[in-house]
C-alpha cells in the first residue's frame, strides 16, 4: 500500500509484507472466515450473495463455517476445492454498496506495474519524465 504500490522494481526486492488486510468500512481480519482444518470445502453460495452474520456459508468436512458479519460475499472459495487448515474460505464486504466484481486498488496497481514492466525501456524512460 502507499504511493509506491505497483512500482516497477529492477535492482531491488519488493518491500516485505507488513500489516494486515486493508480495512473495508473499518473491518479488517474480522471479515474473513477460515477453515479450521484441511478438507473439501462445500458451499451453495456465490460471489455477490447478500448474507447475514452467523449464517452457515459452507462446510469443510463436517465442520460448519459461518459468515463472520453481514454484507455481501466478496471472496468465496470454489465449491469442491481442497483447502488447508487456516485457509481463508470466505470474505464478506460490509460496505454499501459493496465492491464485489472488478479489480480492487491493489490488483489494479499491480496490473498497471506489469504493463509498465512489459513496455520497451525507451517507453518507460519517457513515461517517467
Image (tube, helix red, strand yellow):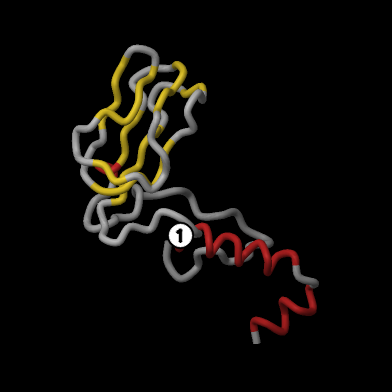
Rendered residue at 39%/49% (across/down): 18
Q: Which residue is mark 1?
A: 104
Which element is circle 1 on? loop
Disc 1 crowd, CA 10 A, few/some/many (<14, 14-19, 20+)? few
Residue sitting at 50 percent across and 59 percent down? 103
- Looking at the image, residue 106 sits to the left or right of residue 14; the answer is left
Q: Nearer the viewer, residue 14 or 20?
A: 20
The residue that appears at 31% across and 39% down in the rendered structure is 32
User: Which quarter of the figure has residue 41?
Assistant: top left
Quadrant in which the C terminus appears:
bottom right
Q: Which residue is nearer to you in this view: 51 or 114? A: 51
Measured from the top left, where is residue 17 in percent x and y? 45, 48
In the rendered image, residue 97, in percent from the top left (x then y), is placed at 30, 61
Q: Is 36 placed above or below 87 here? A: above
Quadrant containing the N terminus is bottom left
Q: Position of residue 88 (x, y in %)?
A: 39, 34
Quadrant in the picture for residue 23? bottom left
Of 44 and 21, which appears nearest the observer?
Answer: 44
Viewed as shown, does residue 16 lie left or right of 61? right
Q: Residue furthest top?
A: 62
79, above or below 115, in the image: above
Q: How many marks?
A: 1
The location of residue 53, given as percent across then percent down, is 19, 38
Amino acid at each position: 500500500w502507499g504511493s509506491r504500490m505497483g512500482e516497477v522494481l529492477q535492482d531491488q526486492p519488493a518491500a516485505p509484507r507488513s500489516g494486515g488486510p486493508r480495512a473495508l468500512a473499518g473491518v479488517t481480519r474480522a471479515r474473513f472466515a477460515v477453515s479450521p482444518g484441511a478438507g473439501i470445502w462445500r458451499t451453495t453460495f456465490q460471489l455477490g450473495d447478500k448474507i447475514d452474520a452467523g449464517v452457515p456459508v459452507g462446510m469443510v468436512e463436517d465442520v460448519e463455517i459461518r459468515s463472520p458479519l453481514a454484507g455481501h460475499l466478496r471472496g468465496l472459495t470454489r465449491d469442491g476445492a481442497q483447502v488447508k487448515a487456516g485457509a481463508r474460505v470466505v470474505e464478506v464486504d460490509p460496505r454499501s454498496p459493496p465492491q464485489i466484481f472488478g479489480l480492487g486498488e491493489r490488483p489494479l496497481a499491480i496490473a498497471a506495474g506489469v504493463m509498465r514492466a512489459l513496455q520497451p525501456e525507451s517507453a518507460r524512460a519517457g513515461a517517467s519524465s
